[in-house]
Amino acid sequence: MQHLSISGQLRHKQANVVSALERHNVAFPVDRITGISPSAWGYRRKGRLGVRYVPKKGGVLVGFREREKNYVTDIKQCHTLVAELSALLPSLKGQLQDISSRESIPQVEVASGMDATAIVVRHLTPLSERDLQQLTSFGREEKVRVYLQSGGPDTIVPLEKRGKPLTYRIRASGDTIEFLATDFIQVNDAANQEIVDSVLHMLALTRSDRVLELFCGLGNLTLPVASNVDRVVGLDYDEQLVCRAKDNALFNHKDNVEFIRADLTEAPVGEWWRSEGFTKLLLDPPRSGALEILNAVVPAIAPERIVYVSCNPETLARDAATLTIQFGYRLEAIQVVDMFTHTGHVETIALFV
Ligand SMILES: C[S@@+](CC[C@H](N)C(=O)[O-])C[C@H]1O[C@@H](n2cnc3c(N)ncnc32)[C@H](O)[C@@H]1O
């Protein structure tokens, strides 16, 4: 979307949200929509790079996969990646070019934390001793934590024993969040800080609040919420993220949080949640939205406020129709945060009261 100015992109995304709401007959005063573009370039602190060995094109290509095609577009730099990840691209490519298993490496994930950078090298066949040594030297020289992945996410191991997770800090609460390069995190740190601030503001938390959070991931929103309430319970179906969320709570001395693994295409396991006395609901679902779980949970707990973080205006509008038309909530405010500037992706936070 680089043909539009940064403010033009934001206006376009706000208009997308408003038109999705109109299509779903959701009443909303347009003057209640706000927007922010916190960082337009060098914002991606995480990326999945395709790798392909094509001798006819001079060797190993490292870059992004073309949409709906099986090609990798070789890149030397990337203006949306954070500077330290973009700067790593040439040496990473050189490294992959030199190792003997280059034909069996389809992908490298890169991620940048507060004070370190990490790469996860996916390999389809075992790496030779020489390749391992070479990657170890690369990691030391470039000050990059190297991880290897031979299969699914549970096969990721640090190349060197002292591999530590990456971290980022949440401005609003001072919490430090640990993550692995392959974990789901909000990719744009500046936008994430704005999202956390807006969520806290919209929830209007008090010390007596009990908050239910659906799709909590590694606790990015849960921990800042926990600083302001009696209790918060976060649910997510990803076992590794739930594990990391529990560690993050311990690490930040949050003892009023609980994380439970649950598949939210169904009602949360058992009936415990009905008697928890939840006062507010926070959710941040994937693109498919949260219709089933909202139908199960909202009538049962009747939260005073619902804050819905969405990465898809279409499912947000569909779910907003259920919350407003069926359950009688009012859509009070909307903020669009341009998390992925220059792309068509729209991140929205909506408050229902
Ligand atoms: C947009 S992320 C939100 C993460 C978190 N709020 C954050 O800020 O980092 C969506 C989350 O939904 C989880 N998820 C996806 N499908 C799910 C399902 N069917 N049941 C439970 N959680 C699911 C993913 O594991 C992921 O953590």
Image (cartoon, rainbow, N blue to C red):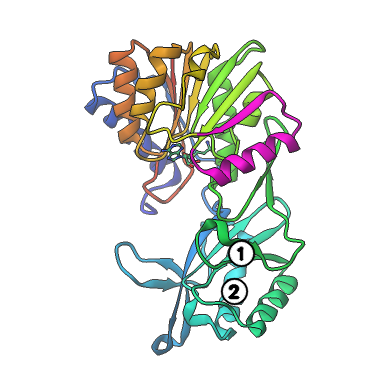
Q: Which residue does the image show at 39% across and 45% down from the upper left?
A: 345
Q: Residue furthest front?
A: 270
Whether tag 1 and tag 2 are in contact, CB under 8 A, the answer is yes
Q: CA distance from mark 1 to mark 2?
A: 9 Å
Side of 96 relative to 166 (left or right): left
Q: Which residue does the image show at 23% across and 21% down from the upper left?
A: 25
Please state the horizontal and vertical placement of residue 89, each as a whole percent of the image.
57, 70
- Checking the image for residue 92, the label placed there is 2
Please state the horizontal and vertical placement of residue 285, each as a whole percent of the image.
43, 35
Side of 118 relative to 37 (left or right): right
Q: Which residue does the image show at 29% across and 21% down from the upper left?
A: 321
- Checking the image for residue 154, the label placed there is none
Q: In terms of image quadrants, where is residue 313?
A: top left
Residue at which label 1 appears: 119
Indicate yes or no whether the magenta region holds residue 150: no
Q: Which residue does the image show at 28% across and 31% down from the upper left?
A: 20
* Segment colored magenta: 237-261
- Residue type, label 1: Ile
- Residue type, label 2: Leu
